[in-house]
Image: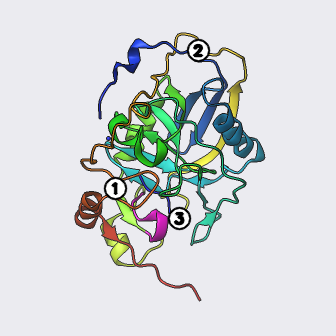
Amino acid sequence: MIKPILALSTAALFSLQAAATVVEIRTNMGNISVNLFDEETPETVENFLEYVNSGAYANNVVHRSEPDFVIQAGGFTYNNTLPLDTVATGVAVVNEPELSNVRGTIAMAKQAGDPNSATSQWFINLSDNSQNLDVQNGGFTVFGQVIENGMDVADAISELPRFNLGGAANSIPLQDYTNDDATNGREPDGDNFVLITDIVVTDAATVTNPDLTPVPNTLIDNGSEPTPPSGGGSSGGAMHPLALLVIAVTTIVFRRRTKR
């Protein structure tokens, strides 16, 4: 489904005003505050806030973790049983690749080969992924920046062991869950998933963090080709073969037992 890496561009020489809404992603591992870039990516922010305000992200699951690359959520919820439920999505939003996928930014995930296919899923960049994601698939739309100590939480999530539950959750981070649990067929539950209890607007002021300067995406304008990922795949298409090899070696395939 949705799949996802490094350089600080001379884009830092440009100055953009960071005007915007602040939201708090509340998880069972801590809260992540995000300053949204309403002025730079208005359509994307409006789309994201529609999901926020509808409650679509309540009980959402961080379903994908690629250490030193991204953590991803927004697509699935846990309602006390498996398989995970899929978030109902609306019309896809038009791509707005204005800003760079540097560490600490939040961006929209999308379908491979379709720049304008983002709906509810998003990811947080754990590294400077600009050389790859700023140009791949039309460029991935960055629409916010993690602030305060939010990246401590994101990094902690990325350090959890990962397991393969199949489908889009083939690299899902789980807490207090072991290889023995997977081998014995024990299904993970609410104590094991990284759950987003809700995402709420905490500051709707026009200018919330005026000192925050987002990095423009200049690679999309100069025709640069994506740099092959090292240790990560694509947030929007089929995973890079190297990433598949890493997951095959480092994760345990979870064998779910069919409930009758």
**Disc 2, disc 3: CB below 8 Å?**
no
Give above or below for 10 relative to 136: above
Considering only order in the chain, which callout, 1 or 3, is on the residue closer to the N terminus?
Answer: 1
Q: Nearer the viewer, residue 162 or 213?
A: 213
From the top left corner, tell me how far across and down residue 188 is, in percent. 48, 66
Disc 1 designates what residue? 161
The residue at 53%/15% (across/down) is 16
- Left or right: 2 as drawn, with respect to 40: left
> What residue is disc 2 on?
209
Mark 2: give few (<14), some (14-19) or many (20+) Cα within 10 Å.
some
| Identity of the residue drawn at 38% across and 36% down | 223
Distance CA(mark 2)–CA(mark 3)? 38 Å
Label 1 or label 2, whichever comes before in sequence order: 1
Work out how far the residue at label 3 is from the one at label 1, CA to CA, in angstroms: 15 Å
Residue 164: x %, y % from top left = 39, 67
Of residues 228 and 194, the one nearer the viewer is: 228
Q: Which residues are magenta?
A: 165-173
Callout 1: SS: loop
x and y, in percent, of residue 121 in the image: 57, 50
Give the side of residue 165 with respect to residue 231, left or right.
right
